C-alpha cells in the first residue's frame, strides 16, 4: 500500500510538470508613437503653446479655458529634442527638452502593439 501511494504521488508530480501553461489573452487596444505636451501651473488667461523640433513643422495649440487640463498629443512625433514655448498674456516661458520616451504596451507585456511615447510638462 505504501508503494502504491508513492507511485501515485510520482505520477501526479510528473503530470504537473508536463501541463502546458495557459496562453496569454491579448486585447486589441491600439496606441501610437508620439509626444504629449501638458501645461502645468495656475493659468489665469488664454495660453498659446508652440512646439518645435529640428526637421519638423512647428505645431501650435491653444487652451482658452483656465479650469480644464491643457494638453495635446502629437501622433508620430518623437524628436530627440523639442522646444516648447508657452505664452500667457505678456509672459513667455521657453525650454528645450529631451523627452524621456518609454515603450507602452496597452495590451500587456507579451501582446502587440508596442508604442514609443513621452510626456513633457511645461509650466506657465
Image (cartoon, rainbow, N blue to C red):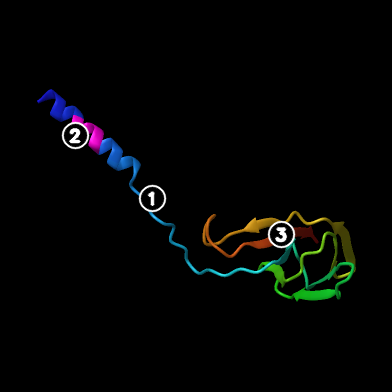
- Mark 3 in CB contact with mark 2 (< 8 angstroms): no
Please report the residue visible at 33 percent of the width from the left and 47 percent of the height from the top: 19
Q: Which residue is mark 1?
A: 21
Please report the residue visible at 69 percent of the width from the left and 67 percent of the height from the top: 33
Of circles 3 and 1, the one toward us is 1
Q: Which residue is mark 2?
A: 8
Which residue of the protein is positioned furthest toward the left in this rendering? Answer: 1
User: What is the crowding at mark 3: few (fewer than 14 residues within 10 Å), some, or many (at least 20)?
Assistant: some
**Horizontal and vertical percent position of residue 113:** 59, 65
Q: Is residue 10 magenta?
A: yes
Q: Which numbered disc, 3 or 1, marks the residue that appears first in the sequence?
A: 1
- Give the spatial CA distance, label 3 vs label 1: 34 Å
Viewer-proximal residue among 87 and 1 = 1
Of circles 3 and 2, the one toward us is 2
Of circles 1 and 2, the one toward us is 2
- Mark 3 in CB contact with mark 1 (< 8 angstroms): no
Q: Is residue 28 magenta?
A: no
Please report the residue visible at 75 percent of the width from the left and 54 percent of the height from the top: 100
Q: Quadrant of the C terminus?
A: bottom right
Which residue of the protein is positioned furthest toward the top in this rendering? Answer: 2
Amino acid at each position: 500500500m505504501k508503494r502504491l501511494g508513492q507511485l501515485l504521488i510520482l505520477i501526479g508530480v510528473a503530470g504537473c510538470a508536463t501541463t502546458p501553461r495557459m496562453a496569454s489573452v491579448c486585447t486589441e487596444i491600439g496606441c501610437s508613437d508620439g509626444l504629449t505636451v501638458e501645461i502645468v501651473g495656475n493659468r489665469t488667461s488664454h495660453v498659446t503653446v508652440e512646439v518645435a523640433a529640428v526637421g519638423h513643422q512647428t505645431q501650435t495649440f491653444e487652451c482658452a479655458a483656465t479650469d480644464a487640463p491643457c494638453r495635446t498629443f502629437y501622433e508620430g512625433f518623437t524628436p530627440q529634442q523639442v522646444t516648447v514655448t508657452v505664452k500667457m498674456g505678456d509672459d513667455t516661458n521657453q525650454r528645450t527638452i529631451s523627452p524621456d520616451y518609454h515603450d507602452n504596451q496597452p495590451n500587456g507585456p507579451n501582446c502587440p502593439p508596442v508604442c514609443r511615447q513621452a510626456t513633457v510638462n511645461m509650466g506657465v
